[in-house]
Amino acid sequence: MRPTLCAGLAALCLVAAQPVVAASSATPPQISAAHFARYDRTLASDAFGGRKPGTPGGERTVAWLVEQFKRMGLEPGNHGSWFQEVPADTTELLNRDVTLDISSRGKLDHFALGTDMVAQTLQAKATVDLRDSPIVFVGYGADAPAWHWNDYAGLDVKGKTVIVLVNDPGFASGDPKFFNGRAMTYYGRWTYKYAEAALQGAAACFIVHTSDAAAGYPWTVLRNGAKGPQLSLPPSVDPAPRLPVAGWLTHQAAKRLFAAAGKDFDALAASASRPDFKPVPLQATASVKLRNRIGHIQSRNVLAMVKGSQRPGEAVIYTAHWDHLGTDPSLPGHKVFSGAVDNGTGLSMLLQLADAFAHQKTPPQRSVLFFMPTLEESGLLGSQYYVARPVFPLDKTVADIAVDALPVIGRAHDMTAIGKGQSQLEDMLADVLRTQGRTLSPEVTPENGFYFRSDHFNFARAGVPALLPSSGLDLVKGGRKAGEAAAADYTAHRYHTPRDVFDPHWDLSGIEQDTQALYLLGRKLSDSDSFPQWYPGNPFRAARERMMGK
């Protein structure tokens, strides 16, 4: 994309460039509520069409971002380029009347797409024909050495269909010393379950959506998410094994399937969180035929950099995805998914941080990379691509700090660490917050596994310490009750809808304070010669230690 495309948006670019007065002497002048409002209002405008990759609005977005970085005086972040090209395969299911056919004890039952199950292939193939695959219930489908737990121990699932439960054994037990209790671990995420099943050689894996609480979202999210093309990185970028068939079952569908095989699903599900659980082969086989349209798209990550003065080969990374959901002409009224909160807030914060670092009197000792990945809404693909093809070697990457869909609800006594309990980055942020008279709090719903659902997670999975901070909910005006209510209201009424629009009446005082805190954290990291570590027992610690030669 040529940056000159922003010429057509000159008025928008000029609005964002207007100087503002510092909010306080302790805050860099580039960090202010006024700056944030100008950036977010622009990014959420209809001119950007919902910032969907592969659309004119998406092209305008990346061009505008580059214009801002140029105005601020940053350098291109990818060896002289502002972009990193990201290829992706698209898989669109054509036979929408497909059924999952279960043969059990001489009877055949059909499970309908959308109502009973969803299914797709992860192999980007035009046709996948699963026939008479033996079914095995594998509990939570987890191999977790740190917890001395392996649902696949002694089991050969090659060519078989595995059925697994959503979340992890700790959620069912409620014991905080067992898989972190109700706080989801990586072993509870659907991405892990599919990857592990593929590694074990399974032909298919179906996850049971036992409840909204266990999954972190209702069945409608899965049903609606399966309607359009599904995206993945090409095997040349991501060569890990992939499932021929991956899907979900409703709770009622699972009960029906197990009953047909002479088993009580709820009883077996309850037993799956006990240490003596053993996989249960069912007297049943699965068949399904998927016909797909395969395509290919190209999008791009945006990268800008402030080069380090003493250790330029080491980098601190700030991350915020630029993409959103585009425009739906079939909708009544406002048709643009503006994404003012998701993720206009994160982008606006990163732009302020970039400007502040670019205008420091003393440049940072380490390089600071401002990374705006694409295709987050399609499965974190832009950040996955970067981690596979990093600009800075991962063993020279100090940390990743990501911001995504920040609550805009005013000043709070705290900030939130999503997935709190991961690394020393939390200790460093807590130290910064103490200088503001604030604290660092865990998220309200750790069972939803939000730590594994944003771009920083690809860095974490590779071993790089990664932090997902968010605005606090213990509000100065109204306390925690008011903060939680405001956050819940956004999720219920505006998240991933055309109603996620910029509001000129927002109280941005909390966002300003949070931006200042993350700026100070970045300064500490960029002017240090040490590397923060994962906490002992963290599942990503071993990867970091291997990377660093320990």
Image: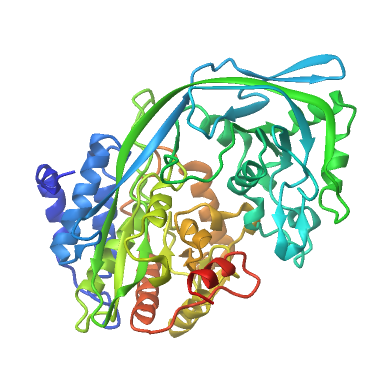
What residue sits 43% from the left and 38% below the top? 497
Residue 238 seen from this side: yes
Q: Position of residue 281 (x, y in %)?
A: 83, 35
What residue sits 46% from the left and 79% below the top? 433
What residue sits 40% from the left and 40% below the top? 499
Q: In the picture, residue 284 is in which quadrant?
A: top right
Report the side of 268 relative to 90 (left or right): right
Q: Position of residue 81 (x, y in %)?
A: 20, 56
Q: In the picture, residue 312 is in which quadrant?
A: bottom left
Q: Nearer the viewer, residue 259 or 469?
A: 259
Q: Position of residue 409 (x, y in %)?
A: 44, 60
Report the side of 495 relative to 120 (left or right): left
Q: In the picture, residue 130 is in which quadrant?
A: top right
Position of residue 337 relative to residue 524, above or below, is: above
Report the side of 76 relative to 205 (left or right): left
Residue 334 seen from this side: no
Position of residue 230 relative to residue 195, above or below, is: above
Position of residue 213 relative to residue 220, above or below, is: below
Location of the N terminus by quadrant is: top left
Q: Position of residue 309 (x, y in %)?
A: 23, 80
Q: Nearer the viewer, residue 81 or 178?
A: 81
What residue sits 29% from the left and 35% below the top? 54
Q: Nearer the viewer, residue 526 or 434?
A: 526
